[in-house]
Amino acid sequence: MKKFSFVIFFPLLLASYYCFAQAEVYMGDISGPPLKEKQYTDIVGSPYFIDQWEKGMVSLVNGKQYSGLLLKYDEFADELNFKYGSGEPMKFVEDVDFFIINHFDTGTLSHIQYKFVSIYLNNRKEFLQSYSWSEKDELKFLIKRKKSMYTTQLYNSATKTNTFENSYSFFVQKKNVLTKIKLNEKELFSFLTSKSQEVGLRDYVKKNALKISKPDDFAKAILYINSLN
């Protein structure tokens, strides 16, 4: 399952991972109804952002925060599940404001943090992956990761195959206004406010060999724009 990771270009990311790991505690005042995990059987692919349970932290709308939980995000159902150690999976009673999943990438031997925020989209709250780690960021780049399921059936065959399919929508949030975008140069440069910023951004993109059509690289460019403000 494809992941968009940004550990390679945010020095702050490694620092935030270290701080989070040091602050890990188990909170005793959190509870939720038992959750019977959905059995996605006979389906090709996975409904989850990451298949295994991963440690992370959760911040609720009521202001309470919890770390040391095991988390699993179901992209198909757009649901966050949690548990303690080997305990039973549960779901949150209170609304989740944002959550962070810690993941160790065995391929790159890197610790990666993925942040998801709850935002109103399509007239309801949905989780979007956020590349912004500071409330001071004027521009925040977000991705709506969605899984859908489709069925195929070969001609003259009674066998049907169900498959999970990934889709991605991209947004930039400015002053709490969410704008759907395409990952191209025109969209990126529309967030600039002066000719000097345009010259600086073009130089930055060239020096770092960024491909604006790639989410990680678009996020780097947005980070650079934030540094100009």
Image (cartoon, rainbow, N blue to C red):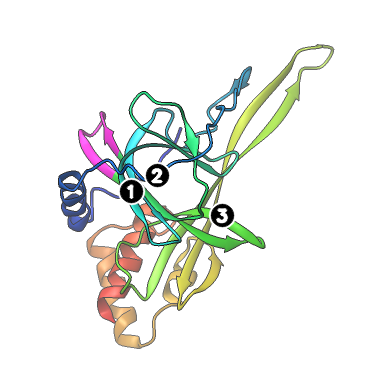
Q: Total label count? A: 3
Decide: is 174 above or below 221: below
Residue that label 1 marks = 66
Q: Kindly report which numbered mark, 2 or 3, lies closer to the viewer in this rendering.
A: 2
Q: Earlier in the sequence, mark 2 or mark 1?
A: 2
| Secondary structure type for disc 2 | loop
* Left or right of 53 on screen, residue 46: right
Q: Label 2 vs label 1: CA separation? A: 8 Å
Q: Main secondary structure of the magenta part?
A: strand
Quarter placement of the C terminus: bottom left
Per the image, is 75 magenta? no
Residue that label 3 marks = 126
Q: Residue at x 30, y 44 (%)?
A: 27
Residue that label 2 marks = 30
Q: Label 1 vs label 3: CA separation? A: 20 Å
Q: Kindly report which numbered mark, 1 or 3, lies closer to the viewer in this rendering.
A: 1
- As drawn, the label of residue 75 is none
- Which class describes the residues within 10 Å of circle 3: few (<14), some (14-19), or many (20+)? some
The boundaries of the magenta stretch are 103-112
- Asked if marks 2 and 1 touch (Cβ < 8 Å), the reply is yes
Q: Earlier in the sequence, mark 1 or mark 3?
A: 1
Q: Kindly report which numbered mark, 2 or 1, lies closer to the viewer in this rendering.
A: 2
Of 202 and 53, which appears nearest the observer? Answer: 53
